[in-house]
Structures are given as C-alpha cells and as structure tokens.
Image (spheres, grey):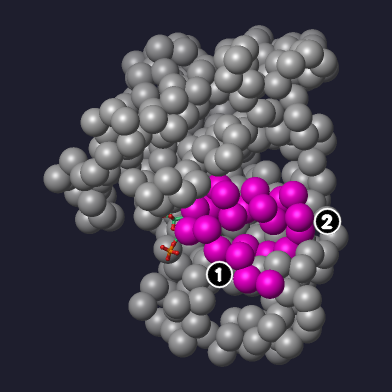
C-alpha cells in the first residue's frame, strides 16, 4: 500500500516542533504507549490461538474476575511505561495502588485502563486501552482538565490509535504490513448532532426519572437508533465519528455509575471535548471534578452538543 500517510511518530514530532521549549519527553512517552498498543493488539487478535483466553482466578480492586488478557495488557503497559523512563508514577484500573517508578526527574503521571470492555474478552468483540497523561504535580490526583494528553487504542476491525495533546484529535490506523500507525483520520470533529444513542438499556428501570424521560424522548424522535457495544472505547469512538450520545448514568444500584473517573471518564471526556463535543457527569463537567479517590466512579454522558444539552434540560427541569 503506497505510504502516503505520515506515521504517528512523525506526526507527534511535528506537533512537538510547535513548542520550541518541548523536551521531546512527551513524544517518547506517546510513541511508547503506541508500542504497547501494538503488543496488546497482536495478543488480542491471536487470543483464540494462544493460551491467553479465560480467567486468571484472581480478582481486581472492584472484586471483578481478572481475565488472562486483562493481566497481559496490564503487565505490558506497566513494563513499557516504566522502561520509557518518562513516568514518575503510574496507576492502572486493575491495580489498587499507584506505582512510583523512583525516576524522580520524570515529568509525567499516567493513568490507564489496560483492557477496556472486559465483557468482550473471549468472545471476539471490540476492546480498547485507555490512557490519560498529566504533568506531575503536588498531588497524584488532579482535575481532568489538567491532562496534557489522553487517548485510546481501539482493537476493532482495524487497530486505531486516537489521541489529543490539547489541540485537536487525530486518528491513526495500524498498517500490519509496515507495523506502524499511519495518520488516517486527521483533526476529527464530532458532528453537532447525531442519530444514535448508546446506553445499557437493561438498567432502564433503575435510572432516575429525568434520564428515563430523556431516553424515551430519543425513541419518540426519529431517527435515533440504539448502539451498545459494551466497550467504552468502541462505543465512544462510534459517537466521536458519527455524532450522538454515550451514556453510563447513575442508577438505583449504582448511585455513582459504573465507569471510573481517572481511568475512563476523564480521558474520554478530554477526547470528546477536544473534538468539539460535551461531557457531563449528570449536570457537571467531569473534567472539573476534584478527585478524592484513585478508583472513584462517576456517572457519565458524552457526545454531540445537541444531545448533551438536551439531556441537561431534562435534569434541570
Ligand atoms: P471494565 O473496565 O470492566 O471493562 O468495565 C467498563 C465497561 O466494560 C466499559 O468499557 C463499557 O462501556 C461498560 O463497562 C459496559 O457495561 P455493561 O456491561 O453494563 O454494558
């Protein structure tokens, strides 16, 4: 295939040159995360052929069963981030406590969900890795708006690396014949309005009344259709590209929702807002939340401005 697209590394280096004082450390960190994504992708795509399916018999901090692929993805991210020498501390959704690398001169703190979409492991449905990068500060936990970069690797029909360093969102597709991520979706902008919505409708009867009324309003107004892949990376990528709204609201059994602020909601809200979309917890901007716990959960709704503003109207009535 003629290589008329620039590689991820070339793109990041070009972006870095816009900042004369840039040290190149963030470039190295991002390219290493992409390398980890390639390693995880190769195991995800061969998981039926190598002994990496099934459960480890262990439980994570949320008392969820840890799959072999979860553990492999986590170990890969920890190893690659540590070896990059750019990470002062790292925190994984799969590990209870943060890990300080003892590289005291390193500038960055990285939060990551090594394998998002655990319900899709072992049944060949989409999976992802989510990462969120902060400059180290006085506290490990910072507001999501302080992120210096965030993104995800999407293990779907193709493998994509989607990220932002604050000025625009760009998507790269892995060319397996070259082994590089090539620029395929330049400066992604979310449509102002969409025609799909994503939510686990199985929880409908547990949602707050305004949330139920919002969802019913989407069903009434043609042509909204429901799309739910049970993998935040895959679902949010769909809304980033096509417009519409992704929801994991609070409900009677989960008053703080299911998804984690530091590992899932902040990075995905960062991407969606840098692409011109909006994000809410229920009525607040998740990127403004002052985190109190590493593994805290938050309700989340994000996507096109039209739908997000409409949701807010139902909750402000
Ligand atoms: P994991 O971190 O355990 O994968 O849970 C997060 C997640 O899989 C999201 O990726 C997805 O949006 C959501 O849970 C699906 O939840 P449900 O199983 O209720 O549809």
Q: In this view, does 257 lie to the left or right of 122?
A: right
Residue drawn at x 36%, y 78% as measured from the top left: 253
Q: Give the range drawn in magenta.
A: 225-246
Q: Residue 316, how many percent across, how many down?
A: 70, 83
Q: How crowded is mark 1: few (under 14 residues within 10 Å), some or many (20 or more)?
A: many
Q: Residue 131, how many percent across, how many down?
A: 52, 36
Asked if the magenta segment contains residue 236, the reply would be: yes
Q: Is residue 128 left or right of residue 13?
A: left
Disc 1 to disc 2, C-alpha distance? 19 Å
Sequence-wise first label, 1 or 2 = 2
Residue 90 can be seen in this image: no
> In the rendered image, which residue does mark 1 sit on?
199
Residue 22 can be seen in this image: yes
Q: What element carries label 1?
A: loop
**Quadrant field for ligand 1:** bottom left
Residue drawn at x 76%, y 29% as measured from the top left: 184
Asked if the magenta segment contains residue 156, the reply would be: no
Residue drawn at x 27%, y 33% as measured from the top left: 52
Residue drawn at x 39%, y 73% as measured from the top left: 254
Q: In this view, does 6 lie to the left or right of 82?
A: right
Instruction: Say which of 289 and 55 sits in front.
Output: 55
| Residue sitting farthest toward the left | 57
Q: Is residue 188 above or below residue 192?
A: above
> In the rendered image, which residue does mark 2 sit on?
191
Q: Residue 125, how many percent across, how many down?
A: 46, 49
Q: Residues within 10 Å of mark 2 (few under 14, many from 20)?
A: some
Check if mark 1's residue and mark 2's residue have beta carbons within 8 Å. Answer: no
Q: Is residue 85 above or below residue 96?
A: above
């Amino acid at each position: 295939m003629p290589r008329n697209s620039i590689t991820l590394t070339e793109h990041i280096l070009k972006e870095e040159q816009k900042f004369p004082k840039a040290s190149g450390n963030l470039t190295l960190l991002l390219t290493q995360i992409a390398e980890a994504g390639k390693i995880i992708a190769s195991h995800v795509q061969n998981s039926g052929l190598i002994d990496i399916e099934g459960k480890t018999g262990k439980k994570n901090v949320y008392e969820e069963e840890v799959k072999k692929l979860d553990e492999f993805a986590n170990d890969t991210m920890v190893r690659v981030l540590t070896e990059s020498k750019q990470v002062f501390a790292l925190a994984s959704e799969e590990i209870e406590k943060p890990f300080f690398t003892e590289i005291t001169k390193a500038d960055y703190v990285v939060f990551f969900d090594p394998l998002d979409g655990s319900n899709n492991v072992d049944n060949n449905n989409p999976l992802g890795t989510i990462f969120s990068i902060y400059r180290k500060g006085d506290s490990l936990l910072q507001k999501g708006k302080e992120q210096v970069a965030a993104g995800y690797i999407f293990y779907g029909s193709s493998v994509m690396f989607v990220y932002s360093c604050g000025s625009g969102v760009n998507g790269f597709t892995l060319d397996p014949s070259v082994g590089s991520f090539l620029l395929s979706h330049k400066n992604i902008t979310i449509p102002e309005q969409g025609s799909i919505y994503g939510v686990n409708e199985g929880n409908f009867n547990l949602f707050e009344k305004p949330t139920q009324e919002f969802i019913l309003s989407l069903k009434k107004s043609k042509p909204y259709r429901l799309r739910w892949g049970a993998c935040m990376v895959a679902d949010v990528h769909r809304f980033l590209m096509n417009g519409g709204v992704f929801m994991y609201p609070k409900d009677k059994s989960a008053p703080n929702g299911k998804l984690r602020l530091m590992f899932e909601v902040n990075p995905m809200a960062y991407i969606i807002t840098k692409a011109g979309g909006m994000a809410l917890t229920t009525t607040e901007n998740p990127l403004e939340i002052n985190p109190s716990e590493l593994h805290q959960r938050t309700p989340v709704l994000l996507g096109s401005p039209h739908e997000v503003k409409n949701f807010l109207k139902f909750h402000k009535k």
